[in-house]
């Protein structure tokens, strides 16, 4: 009865997926809105937590795969930490973030306007040499991942590179801060990318890093757009 009542209450809300976690029923459309609410209301705190994180090893791997001075899309740019690094090192950068508050703060930090749009609103054609999606696509529901990958692939120039990172695991969940996450392993992200004929995985590996008093295992993925 509880489930029926919930569905009636949400009858005018777009629902793509129901996620069961313990005794909780999580609706991804609502969870995504709560995720966005977190980043809008806690934008400054999030920037302070992440702007100084060292991701130099991953950035170097990424930059080694794209042309010097190339055009990079910072997809889900957060604080603007990486977009600013790319600009400071001679790359052209387009940065976007779904959080309006993060987009404002990142614009100030980067020194150029950050577009306020979601992954699902990405609309470019053969524009970028590289797409940097560092700890951002992990908020995209699995039901929408294929469509987002198609948009990213379309946005890349031939031989362009996508970097994406996810928290390591299975399934979808909501964390203690109310944020929605899609977790991946090597096997399931490989299966997802394999369904996109224009993309080929270049490298995939895991690493553990400190996170709020503990450690988090991350899945790093580099994929290349094939030349037809």
Image (cartoon, helix red, strand yellow):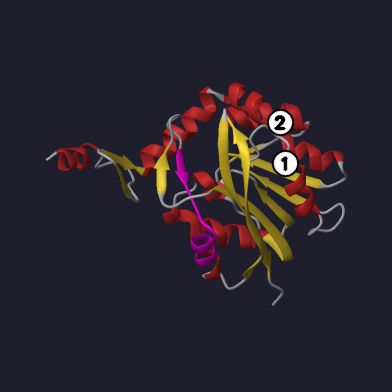
Mark 1 highlights which residue? Answer: 55
Depth check: give the residue in front, 132 or 171. Answer: 171
Q: Quadrant of the C terminus?
A: bottom right
In the image, residue 17 above or below residue 146: above
SS at mark 2 in the image: helix
Residue 51 place in picture, x, y as percent? 70, 30
The range drawn in magenta is 180-191
Residue 186: within the magenta?
yes
C-alpha span from label 1 to label 2? 20 Å
In the rendered image, which quarter is residue 95 located in?
top right
- Specify few, some or many for label 1: CA neighbours under 10 Å numbering under 14, 14-19, or 20 or more: few
Q: Quadrant of the N terminus?
A: top left
Q: Nearer the viewer, mark 1 or mark 2?
A: 1
Mark 2 highlights which residue? Answer: 107
Residue 180 place in picture, x, y as percent? 44, 40
Residue 59 place in picture, x, y as percent? 76, 47
Residue 152: within the magenta?
no
SS at mark 1 in the image: loop
- Specify few, some or many for label 2: CA neighbours under 10 Å numbering under 14, 14-19, or 20 or more: many
Q: Residue at x 42, y 55 (%)?
A: 143
Residue with the most extreme bottom position: 228
Q: Pick whichever of labels 1 and 2 is earlier in the sequence.
A: 1
Q: Is residue 148 left or right of residue 52?
A: left
Query: How many badges with numbers are in the image?
Result: 2
In the image, residue 169 above or below residue 1: below
Q: Residue at x 33, y 42 (%)?
A: 27
Q: Residue at x 61, y 30 (%)?
A: 102
Depth check: give the residue in front, 166 or 32. Answer: 166
Marks 2 and 1: in contact by CB < 8 Å? no
Residue with the most extreme left position: 1
In the rendered image, which quarter is residue 106 located in?
top right
């Amino acid at each position: 009865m509880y489930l029926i009542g919930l569905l009636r209450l949400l009858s005018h809300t777009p629902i793509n997926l129901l996620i069961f976690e313990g005794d909780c029923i999580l609706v991804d459309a609502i969870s995504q809105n709560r995720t966005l609410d977190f980043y809008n209301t806690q934008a400054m705190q999030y920037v302070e937590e992440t702007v100084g994180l060292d991701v130099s090893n991953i950035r170097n791997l990424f930059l080694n795969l794209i042309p010097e001075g190339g055009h990079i899309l910072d997809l889900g740019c957060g604080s603007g930490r990486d977009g600013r690094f790319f600009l400071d090192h001679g790359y052209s950068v387009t940065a976007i973030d779904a959080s309006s508050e993060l987009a404002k703060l990142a614009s100030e930090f980067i020194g150029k306007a950050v577009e306020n749009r979601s992954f699902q609103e990405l609309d470019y054609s053969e524009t970028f040499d590289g797409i940097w999606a560092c700890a951002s696509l992990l908020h995209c529901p699995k039901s929408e991942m294929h469509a987002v990958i198609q948009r990213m692939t379309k946005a890349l120039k031939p031989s362009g590179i996508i970097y994406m990172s996810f928290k390591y695991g299975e399934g979808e969940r909501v964390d203690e801060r109310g944020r929605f996450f899609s977790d991946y392993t090597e096997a399931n992200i490989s299966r997802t990318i394999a369904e996109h004929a224009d993309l080929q995985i270049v490298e995939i590996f895991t690493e553990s890093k400190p996170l709020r008093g503990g450690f988090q295992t991350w899945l790093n993925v580099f994929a290349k757009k094939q030349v037809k």
